[in-house]
Amino acid sequence: MGFEVVNPKALAKIEEARERARRLHRRQTQQANYRNTSEAQKANSKRRYERFASIIREAKARPCTDCGIQLPPPCMDLDHVRGPKLFSPSQWMKAPKLPGMTHEEVVREELAKCEVRCANCHRLRHYQASLA
Ligand SMILES: [Zn+2]
């Protein structure tokens, strides 16, 4: 059993080529999957997206807890203030699967841990916390 002497630069090149191949394969697979998705599935997926997007929009449609200003939902943040953070509710698609709960229940439970703050107050709050 001997050791092979390898050139680290050559190894890196091989790894880069492998990564390019993986990316190409991933893209081709995703494109093929998309082509094989029926219109009904696409419509379903769009409805689901709209439903969760509106849950988040509604949750953000209230005045800032700190300054009382109410801006359009994209300018309002959901600030975790209670309990452990499992995920960011605006990233509802990344919500974990929890036994005995629907996806919507998991998202709503996470929302209940949050207060609504405008982006400025949210930043300030975390900045001040970083100084403490
Ligand atoms: Zn504010």
Image (spheres, rainbow, N blue to C red):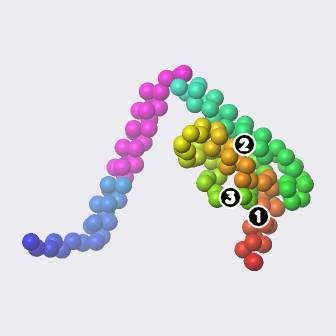
x and y percent of residue 28 in the render? 39, 39
Residue picked out by circle 2: 56
Instruction: Please state which of the two labelled residues, at mark 3 or mark 2, is closer to the viewer.
Output: 3
Residue type, label 1: Arg
Residue picked out by circle 1: 123
Instruction: Please state which of the two labelled residues, at mark 1 or mark 2, is closer to the viewer.
Output: 2
Mark nearer the N terminus (3 vs 2)? 2
Judged left or right of residue 36, residue 67 is right
Q: Quadrant of the N terminus?
A: bottom left
Residue type, label 2: Ile
Judged left or right of residue 103, residue 65 is right
How many neighbours does mark 3 have within 10 angstroms: few (below 14), some (14-19), or many (20 or more)? few
The answer to whether residue 90 shows anywhere in this view is no
Residue picked out by circle 3: 83
> Residue at left 58%, top 31%?
45
Q: Which residues are magenta?
A: 20-40
> Residue at left 85%, top 54%?
64
Q: Residue furthest front?
A: 100
Q: Residue furthest left?
A: 1
**Which secondary structure type mostly characterizes the magenta part of the structure?**
helix
As displayed, is residue 34 above or below residue 76? above
Mark nearer the N terminus (1 vs 3)? 3
Mark 1 and mark 3: Cα distance apart in space? 20 Å
Whether the residues at callouts 1 and 3 have beta carbons within 8 Å, the answer is no
Residue 132: image quadrant is bottom right
Label 1 SS: helix
Judged left or right of residue 13, residue 116 is right
